[in-house]
Amino acid sequence: MIVVGAGFTGLSAADALVAAGLDVIVLEARDRVGGRVERTAFADGVAMDTGGQFICDEMPNVIALTRRFGMSLVETPLQGAFLVQPQALADTGSSFAESGRIRARGNRIDPRDPAIAGLTVGEWLARQSDPPGAKASYQAMVEGLWCRPIEEIPLWYLIDNDRRTISNGNELQYFAEGTIHVLAEALAATLGPRLRLGTPVLHITRTDGSVLVTRGNGDVLTARQMIIAVPPVMASRIVHVPELPKPLDGALAAWKSGTVIKALVRYERPFWRDRGLSGMIMWRDTLGLFACDVSSAQTTALVVFAGGPLAVEWSGRGRVFIEVEIRRRLVDALGEAAADVTGLLIRNWVSDPWSGGGYSDVIADLQAYDTEDILRAGAPPVHFASSELASSFPAYIEGAIVAGREAAVRVIATVQSAIATSASGS
Ligand SMILES: Cc1cc2nc3c(=O)[nH]c(=O)nc-3n(C[C@H](O)[C@H](O)[C@H](O)COP(=O)(O)OP(=O)(O)OC[C@H]3O[C@@H](n4cnc5c(N)ncnc54)[C@H](O)[C@@H]3O)c2cc1C
């Protein structure tokens, strides 16, 4: 059994396959595990999550995994006032609540309702009679979370995706002490020599009854089954011989990578709390920009996200521009004390070579209703998995664990059925 990719999807699939007694090899392109979950250390050695970070009580699988490996969770400090920038647009508790009502109204529509066929989120929003402030907040929320322009996202996809995602609690509820990336490493450590880092899979050949994988160095590995546990856009870059069936090719081509930049900004102390502020900031003049307090006993820090079209624009202007913009906007929002930054990490995920732009890939084809079902069915012995395909919390770490385990169940069923067939034939 070969698993391609050692993000949470691939690691969780491998974990389940090993538990079922199967032989597994995991091939990972990078020289580390975790994929869209990674950690980066500041000069003083303090490490923080520069990829996925937050989890909440409504995500049972990732919570259980943190318990399995004895990890401690930190409650995200959320007490205090939520800031909307610029202050002149802070009409806002109300427009924020109204944008939530637009989201709930959308989610009540059946994704397959012919009345919304062919509509993008942008076109649907233009038809709503809500106040402009509420619409702008809704657009900021969608572009900040799905990380693509609302003119590109099919409405049916957003509804279907959000219905599987939405939590009644707070998605920012916890982060892991010492980073959630350590959890990926802990899971990977249980695999021992079954895990091969620095091993991109570029070429897959299907023969009668087995799969041949050509690794970056030209070596060939053989397996009975394989799970390609990489985001759909990355999966579409792997060459298959013979070509994948047409519907699968089309299903892989229906996605675009999201685009996000994540920054971690450290301070001596959480000075914003002196003014009763939570550190949570949403910019209404710059859609897709959001900040939140991620201070812990270890350090004081704000995380800043630039998502969607904003990330593409900032990425094009380069790192110095991004740093200057983040500093300037934090000073505008929180005052001069925000200029006294003691450490800054900027992780630009736009065009990441192995995971795409983050947080997740998004379907950008208005007609591609069956895309996820086609990918879940795969072309056995080749199976597909990634957080995007999860039945719950797609595009989250929780979703990756769910998707990995769901793929493992499909593979185990295929193996058992092959054994049953050969037993009945002998
Ligand atoms: C900046 C950022 C912030 C986020 N914040 C959160 C958050 O707070 N909470 C949350 O729940 N989620 C968050 N997410 C989303 C979450 O991180 C992802 O949904 C999840 O980690 C995806 O896991 P995955 O295993 O499906 O994919 P990935 O993590 O992308 O794993 C795929 C792996 O496959 C490897 N790979 C790709 N191609 C090949 C190949 N050809 N051969 C071999 N290996 C290959 C990649 O290197 C990678 O390791 C965030 C993501 C980003 C980028």
Image (cartoon, rainbow, N blue to C red):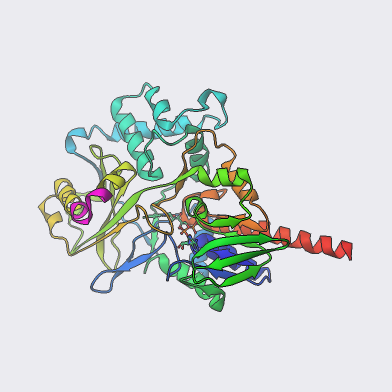
Observer-nearest residue: 402 or 349?
A: 349
Observer-nearest residue: 112 or 29?
A: 29
**Left or right, residue 424 beside residue 371:** right
Magenta stretch bounds: 315-323
Residue 81 image position (x, y, % from top left): 25, 45
Name which residue lies at 19% across and 62% down: 269
Is residue 238 shown in magenta? Answer: no
Residue 424 image position (x, y, % from top left): 88, 62
Above or below — where is 351 with respect to 213? above
Above or below — where is 104 with respect to 348? above
Residue 180 image position (x, y, % from top left): 41, 64
Residue most extreme to the left:
336
Is residue 316 shown in magenta? Answer: yes
Above or below — where is 330 with respect to 108? below
Q: Give the quarter the ligand 1 occupies.
A: bottom left
Observer-nearest residue: 1 or 105?
A: 1
Name which residue lies at 36% across and 53% down: 351
